[in-house]
Amino acid sequence: MASSSRFGAFLHPYARPTRPADEFVCIVRGEGARVWDRNGKEYLDGMASLWYANVGYGRREIADAVADQISQIAAFSCFDPFSVEPAESLAERIAALAPMPDARVFFTSSGSEAVDSAIKLARIAHHRAGRADRHLIVSRGRAYHGVTYGGLSAQGLPLNQEGFGPFVEGMINLPPDDIEATAQFMAERGDEVAAIIAEPVQGAGGVYPPPPGYLAGLRRLADQHGAYLVFDEVISGFGRLGRWWGAQHYDVTPDLITFAKAVTSGYIPLGGVLVGSDVRAALEADDTWMLRHGHTYSGHAAACAAGLANLDIIDREGLLDRATVIGARLFGGLQTLVDDGLLGALRHAGAVGATVMAEGRDAFAVRDALLDAGVITRAVNPQTLTWCPPLVISDAEIDRIVDAVASATRTPLSDR
Ligand SMILES: Cc1ncc(COP(=O)(O)O)c(C=O)c1O
């Protein structure tokens, strides 16, 4: 039966279930860094949709690659004994870009699945190496690691967890930037820890770059105590910080890296885990052992074809270098608004950042004012708007975003 309620049949993710269907902005088309809604209104996208559309919208080249693949074979199981060529090629390509030598690639369809896979791979690798007592996963406050139970249990944003318990056992959430607190925990229980997981730049929690030396400190602690280090690069992977990986930007090499989003720029859902040599060695030690983990779409052929075409574009158009230029212009512009008192504060790294509202101003109201003005941002909490534009945004478009933020925050509070 068709839904007759004003809410419509689509139960939206991360939304009030009671928000009327006609209040959502329905996007129908995109080109470069711009998208259009079903009423024909144009928007400049300051968020690459949801931190993923690095090559921008309307790329015929990716559409053609996907169409070609679907007309040959859209997907086929990659469970033993099968394989598909796009998964093999994309794994080779990503492994060659990896910051760690001799990595292999496990595919998923989302970032959450990638995080859960990394947690499982870390635990099973210790188990295979005779260290079954190592099962704890150490994470950070403010961390966002997705919504399936592994990543949800590890994340450090209590509002997202409220009411969803009980959670996965063995998750230890520590203060986000406090290497001393982590060192103390590792001194007490380091021999039970399977892995430390961290976003190189915390994203959905409000864009917090790491304090100097913090990530290197995590690497040192992991080494000292025999734990793996996992970087959750679902946002920072594939160019956001001006390098392929946040690991390279901060010059710290983890054992496992989760990725998703910009691996295809969202043209088809895809995620995965880069598996470094220590974890590999544990998984490959016994020729008779079988990895009993995998999703129906692990290595989905059409998704991997989208990934290959997407990486070609990032390479050919020099989008890694462009990320650095975009970040300097956008956050340089937004900093002037902080200096003028229109904004309270700014945090950023590469081409991702967050603006904190001035006292008394609500980020959701500013987001709505910006939407009216044709600029898309994301309010992650009542104080914070996040910025993560497609890496094809032009200088003039960046300046338009800064001007729109200035106008939206200059309006007297009483006029809202
Ligand atoms: C760092 C990080 N990890 C995991 C996820 C979850 O990814 P997905 O929403 O594709 O499941 C996200 C999503 O924003 C993320 O930012």
Image: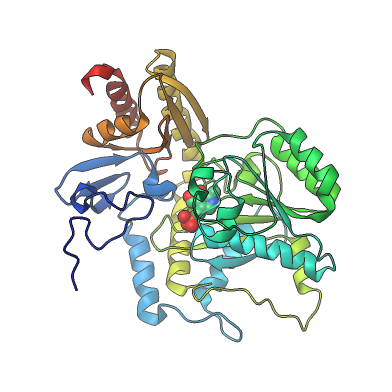
Q: Residue at coordinates 41% horizontally, 18% vertically from top-left?
A: 359
Left or right: 23 as drawn, with respect to 200 = left
Q: Toward the viewer: 195 or 63?
A: 195
Q: Residue furthest left?
A: 39
With respect to residue 96, does 326 lie above or below? above
Screen quadrant of the N terminus: bottom left
Q: Nearer the viewer, residue 185 or 276?
A: 185
Quadrant, the C terminus: top left
Q: How is the image coloured?
A: rainbow
Q: Is residue 237 visible?
A: no
Above or below: residue 307 compared with residue 157: below
Q: Which residue is farthest bottom?
A: 81
Q: Is residue 414 above or below residue 195?
A: above
Q: Is residue 190 visible?
A: yes
Query: Could you tell me residue 231's position as x and y percent?
Result: 64, 50
Viewer-proximal residue among 142 and 410 = 142
Q: Count of labels shown?
A: 0
Of residue 326 and residue 343, the one placed in the foreground of this image is 343
Residue 44: x percent and y percent? 29, 39
Q: Residue at x 55, y 56 (%)?
A: 165
Q: Is residue 401 left or right of residue 110?
A: left
The percent position of residue 197, horizontal first and vertical second, equals 66, 50
Is 266 on the left-hand or right-hand side of 396?
right
> Residue 216 appears at what percent x and percent y?
74, 39
